[in-house]
């Protein structure tokens, strides 16, 4: 017990005498060099003028159930989000007071641009697996 008291007292006194100075505190700060936002890769125009550009376009022309919102304000948020992404939406209220949201994407929307036909086909296969109609132009 006596050893424990001595150890605690020594640690306390060492802390008092060895307080860090302002220079030591500033030197130990690590600055974050990475930006807080993740940069997405952007499309760069090809440098050659005779390059064929492949656009992968998708649409979903049939009405699909997108979800059920518990109230009107939640359904407005869901519908605005879907509209911003290119969907046309409709909403119906069921007997429980919940709002069912259905949507479709009637027009063609470009989802990828590439100069490589194999990559365009691969991107089209990805979107086709998600249930969309795909065309590569």
Image (tube, helix red, strand yellow):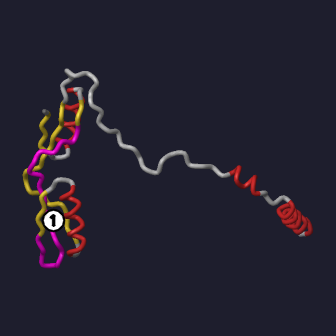
**Horizontal and vertical percent position of residue 32:** 56, 49
State whether residue 78 is above or below residue 86: below
Place residue 19 in its image quadrant: bottom right
Q: Quarter of the image containing the N terminus? A: bottom right
Mark 1 lies on residue: 101
Taking the spot 14% from the left edge, 34% from the top edge, the residue there is 136
**Horizontal and vertical percent position of residue 13:** 87, 65
Q: Is residue 95 magenta?
A: yes
Q: Which residues are magenta?
A: 92-112
Taking the spot 29% from the left edge, 36% from the top edge, the residue there is 43
Secondary structure under badge 1?
Answer: strand
Taking the spot 14% from the left edge, 60% from the top edge, the residue there is 65
Foreground residue among 18 and 92: 18
**Horizontal and vertical percent position of residue 85:** 21, 54
State whether residue 92 is above or below residue 39: below
Foreground residue among 14 and 33: 33
Q: Is residue 49 magenta?
A: no
State whether residue 88 is above or below residue 76: above
Q: Quarter of the image containing the C terminus? A: top left
Q: Is residue 5 left or right of residue 73?
A: right
Place residue 84 in its image quadrant: bottom left
Taking the spot 12% from the left edge, 78% from the top edge, the residue there is 95
**Horizontal and vertical percent position of residue 73:** 23, 74
């Amino acid at each position: 017990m006596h050893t424990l008291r001595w150890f605690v007292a020594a640690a306390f006194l060492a802390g008092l005498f060895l307080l860090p100075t302002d220079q030591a505190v500033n030197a130990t700060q690590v600055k974050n060099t990475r930006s807080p936002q993740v940069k997405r890769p952007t499309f760069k125009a090809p440098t050659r003028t005779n390059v064929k550009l492949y656009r992968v376009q998708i649409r979903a022309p049939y009405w699909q159930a997108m979800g059920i919102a518990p109230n009107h304000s939640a359904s407005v948020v869901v519908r605005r989000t879907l509209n911003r992404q290119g969907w046309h939406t409709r909403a119906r209220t069921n007997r429980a007071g919940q709002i069912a949201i259905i949507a479709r994407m009637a027009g063609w929307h470009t989802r990828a641009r590439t100069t490589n036909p194999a990559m365009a086909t691969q991107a089209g296969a990805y979107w086709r697996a998600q249930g969309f109609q795909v065309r590569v132009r």
